[in-house]
Image (cartoon, rainbow, N blue to C red):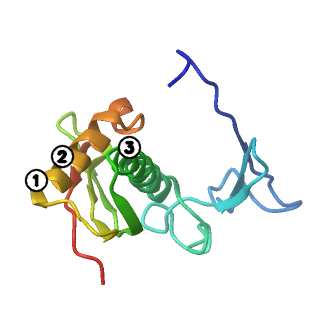
Amino acid sequence: MSHDRSDHLARIRWQRPTGEPFSDNRYSRRHEWQFDGGATVPASSSPHSVPLPYSDPAAVDPEEAFVAALASCHMLWFLFLAAKSGWVVDSYRDDASGVLARNAAGKFAMTVVTLRPAVAWGGAHQPDAAERARLHHAAHEACYIANSVTTDVRCEPVDPD
């Protein structure tokens, strides 16, 4: 980074529909995430945490967003490091997953996030297994999100389809 600090903004918006109950805990958890770049994402609690119809399974839940943030950060660093090392990446896919379970303190937490990056390489020369592992390790070490959490973040690269 060229500086020691950057601020990142997100606006979370929820509105109780007129006349909808609230204090009985029967209210919609659907809301929006608005980001400083202009993107708006439909969000909700997970149906695993709050039953339908109070959750929206089509919206992004915080647990999914957590997994996606880790996977995205890892990918962005991986692409940067691969390019810097002179490798050519044609495509990158990650079927990442996270486990919500009780942690050592007995609290629910995202205890494990597993990244499964599948990288297709281009160019005349392609990195060997040791170089691919080095790139993934370096990407994990550099990832701001991974550096910000206590979750066990694992990286298990897979072959692309």
Q: Amino acid at mark 3?
A: Lys
CA distance separating discs 2 and 1: 6 Å
Distance in Å between CA atoms under marks 2 and 3:
13 Å
* Residue 7 percent across, percent down from the top left: 64, 25
Disc with the residue nearer the chain's start (2 vs 3)? 3
Q: Secondary structure at mark 3?
A: helix
Are the two marked residues, 2 and 1, in contact with CB atoms closer than 8 angstroms? Answer: yes
Query: Against 80, is 99 above or below?
Result: below
The answer to whether 43 appears left or right of 17 in the picture is: left
Circle 2: element type? helix
Q: Which residue is mark 1?
A: 130
What is the spatial separation of the Cα atoms under label 3 and label 1, in whole angstroms?
17 Å
Amino acid at circle 2: Arg
109 shown above or below 132: above
Whether residue 23 is visible here, answered yes or no, is yes
Q: What residue does disc 3 label?
A: 84
Placement of 4 over or under 78, stated as above or below: above
Query: In percent of the image, x 29 and y 59: which residue is there?
Result: 115
Residue contact at pointers 3 and 1, CB within 8 angstroms: no
Instruction: Identify the residue position indicated by label 2 in the image.
Output: 134
Residue shown at the point (16%, 52%) measured from the top left:
131
Q: Position of residue 92 (x, y in %)?
A: 39, 67
Observer-side mark, 3 or 1, equals 3
Question: Which residue lies at the image location 45% right of the left edge and 49% below the top edge?
Answer: 76
